[in-house]
Image: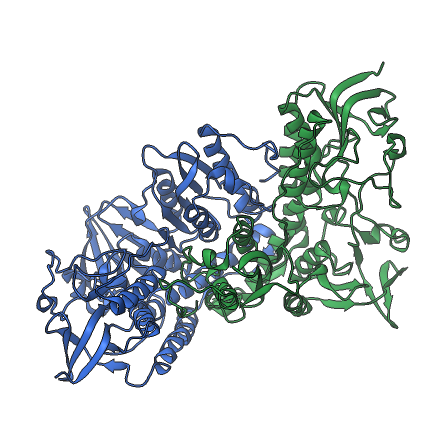
Chain colours: A green, B blue
Amino acid sequence: MADLTCDVAVIGAGTAGISAEHNARKHGARTLLIDPEFAGTTCATVGCMPSKLLIAAGRAAHGARKAGVFGIGTGPVSVDGRAVMKRVREERDRFVAGTRKGFDRLPEGTCIRARARFTSATTLELDDGRSVSAKAVVIATGSAPMVPGPYRALGDLTLTNETVFELDDLPQSLAVIGAGVIGLELAQAMARLGVRVAVFDRAERLAQMRCERVHDALKDAMAQEMALHLGSDPQPSEEGGKVRIDWDGQSEFFDRVLVATGRPPNLKGLNLEATGLKLNDKGMPEVSEATMQCGEAPIFMAGDANAMHPVLHEASDEGAIAGRNAVAYPAVVRSDRRVPLSLTFTEPPLVSIGQGPDESAKIGTADYSSQGRARVDDENTGVARIYAAAPRGRLIGADLFCPGADHMGHLLALAIQQGLTAEELLSMPFYHPTLEEGLRGALKEICRAVPLHLSGDQDPGSPPGG
Amino acid sequence: MADLTCDVAVIGAGTAGISAEHNARKHGARTLLIDPEFAGTTCATVGCMPSKLLIAAGRAAHGARKAGVFGIGTGPVSVDGRAVMKRVREERDRFVAGTRKGFDRLPEGTCIRARARFTSATTLELDDGRSVSAKAVVIATGSAPMVPGPYRALGDLTLTNETVFELDDLPQSLAVIGAGVIGLELAQAMARLGVRVAVFDRAERLAQMRCERVHDALKDAMAQEMALHLGSDPQPSEEGGKVRIDWDGQSEFFDRVLVATGRPPNLKGLNLEATGLKLNDKGMPEVSEATMQCGEAPIFMAGDANAMHPVLHEASDEGAIAGRNAVAYPAVVRSDRRVPLSLTFTEPPLVSIGQGPDESAKIGTADYSSQGRARVDDENTGVARIYAAAPRGRLIGADLFCPGADHMGHLLALAIQQGLTAEELLSMPFYHPTLEEGLRGALKEICRAVPLHLSGDQDPGSPPGG
């Protein structure tokens, strides 16, 4: 008999694991939450929160430098790198402490501080020697930065999105490898904090943006703040305590290099082979997006570990679905997932919602380079693209890179999730002067492109600056 | 026979009038747009746009002063009042020019530069001596600041929301009479621009806020930036070129006084008595909110002139409704109006949507004083209150005074207009870490207060800082 028995064993105490344990217990299960460290979630420790704190500092510096536009004098703007990083860590540690307090509130004996490996589909061996027997297991081991060998060889000169927040001071220069969402967020924040930044990527496309028009706006904006070397093949080396990057016959030295080439799932050491699950060439089982179940097994996989939607709200949902279905197994229940929403906290923010601009989509465009409120606040740049399906103009997706996109992304996500048409969304109040008003032009464009028309109650024109 | 004949005569070329003329013409009418000046809309010239420009300058100064929180040094922050006002006017004039260009695009002969007075329900006399005969008339004469006699007696020392934007430089001190939305917006902007500001109001309540909790948060925040003398009876006088305000046995001197005690409709000189309409003791006819019609007459009233909803998007809607119904008369069509949304551009913004917190409402509260993203950006203050109806938790209204309230107000307005329940709104994606996430606590509170429950797919907890 196993040393520990339970209904649901959850491996990994991050966002998905915490959510899975919580929901399994709520549904009546005896649970175990197994983690070697209980250090806090990726989000709080090295993800969402510290990155947004660094971005907030970058925004403050940028805003101070721009204050003259409004008639405000500041004298020279300086960045105290130590103070910047101190606030990032102090506030980050508050969020982490909040997560850790949550562990203390779990029923006694729930938290097991150990590393687990499968010995069968429903049994685990812990690295403290104990064994666990469960009716079902949730894998929520998260992800970790991938650092290719040549960068690993640079030792402390190489940073990841995990170690960058431990810097005591800001580097003077930084090479960023990878122009994905993490790379861009950190690159822009660093640039605004006075760091000389160059971004390298083998691909030509930033943040995998699917809309050409939005990509152009994003690329133009980023190129104003940092060097972009896209379609390049950077080769790193160490020289005189600096990082030397060679690419396309050029070379440049940097204080540090930040590797942001992806965060693959943490599956090493889980010994998934023992579960009997069919694994693909990356060692991944097949996971259902609707149930989080791996094949037909009493094994569920949630959060970054399944590499489907590596963002917090999805990890939280997936944990809840996995936890509930781990209790319900084998009678698992399929869940409707929320409309896909991804948000990159560049400035302006970059947002993708739902479906992309496929051939059949009716597309409405809102240009923020001359939008009234954006101009008032001297942030008039970027574009929003809204996609709809004929014949009624039902909203199906959007891509935005414009001021307020983080907020308007939520508005559009709600409209899309509710299946509203462009005309229905236009029937809500748009206050003047707001950034939201700018969307109306795009929505009206969709209305004109489908056989239905605006009701007679709406002024077909626009207010000044609307 | 009249000198000028038309189907629809529109008096006043502001937001409502422009919209009315536009929509009447779109519905086939021969139109006249009559205005003595064609100076541009209230919004563009003295309302929404210049006030937001002044607020943007105040925000820039405030942000620069706060930059140290993030580790950014600036040296002393100074305000160049002349530069501030120059940008306000230059950008304002751009918006005004946009409006004026619109007049040039109207069919020739549409714009009549004159002041009009009724001689009967469908005939007008112009101050250039010409007469107008119309099948229907739209009154869209707007509103103007009311300045009580004692303040008028102060001459140039007294400012209104119209004259304040003509200042060459900022005053060193400013008394603001009236703690309504216009008074508060300008008072806070001026305070952030280094002006010593005191606000006086006979009432105890700021901006007529209907929710006690939100009012408390608003009052606390405003009191940190300006002196608030509520429930006071200020008496102005001039002394040595300054404004002296006496109240409750105290007195204080100010460079200028800004009177923001209301903007009553511009009806003087219209000679409404000649229309045969029944007028109340303020000289106002009864106007239908659904048709904009005055009684049963071929007269319609839209925008600030009818004193119903003096905000731009309502004026624009009312103009469109009035213009269409002026064509359709006597077969006028009733329109559904949008969910009420009012937004005051204080920082954080103040928003009211739909119904207030009546006795039967289920109330959810989101406290932004410790909300994660707000804390990251060092703007953690304020509160959001969401109101719902039993038994399903259908959202019916909200009051917000918190960061991002301008944006979240739109999200909630859409949800309310669509008749969504708190649970339905919770089914949309809330990205992490955003201000929108903070609303979830309030929505969950409503879910718990009604007999329905959260679906099993959602993590009942919150992410760190969520």
Q: Is residue A172 visible?
A: yes
Residue for point 57% across, 46% down = B373
Above or below, comparing residue A300 to residue A160 in the picture: above
Image position of B391 (left or right of A228): left
* Residue A279, x across and y down, in percent: 87, 40
> Residue A266: which quarter of the image?
top right
Above or below, comparing residue A460 to residue B460 in the picture: below
The residue nearer to you, when weighing B385 against A397, is A397
* Residue B350, x across and y down, in percent: 39, 50
Q: Is residue B386 visible?
A: no
The residue nearer to you, when weighing B367 against A320, is A320
The residue nearer to you, when weighing B210 against A96, is B210
> Residue A316: which quarter of the image?
top right
Residue for point 25% across, 68% down = B326
Q: Quadrant of the C terminus of chain A?
A: bottom left
Q: Quadrant of the N terminus of chain A?
A: top right
Above or below, comparing residue B130 to residue A364 in the picture: below
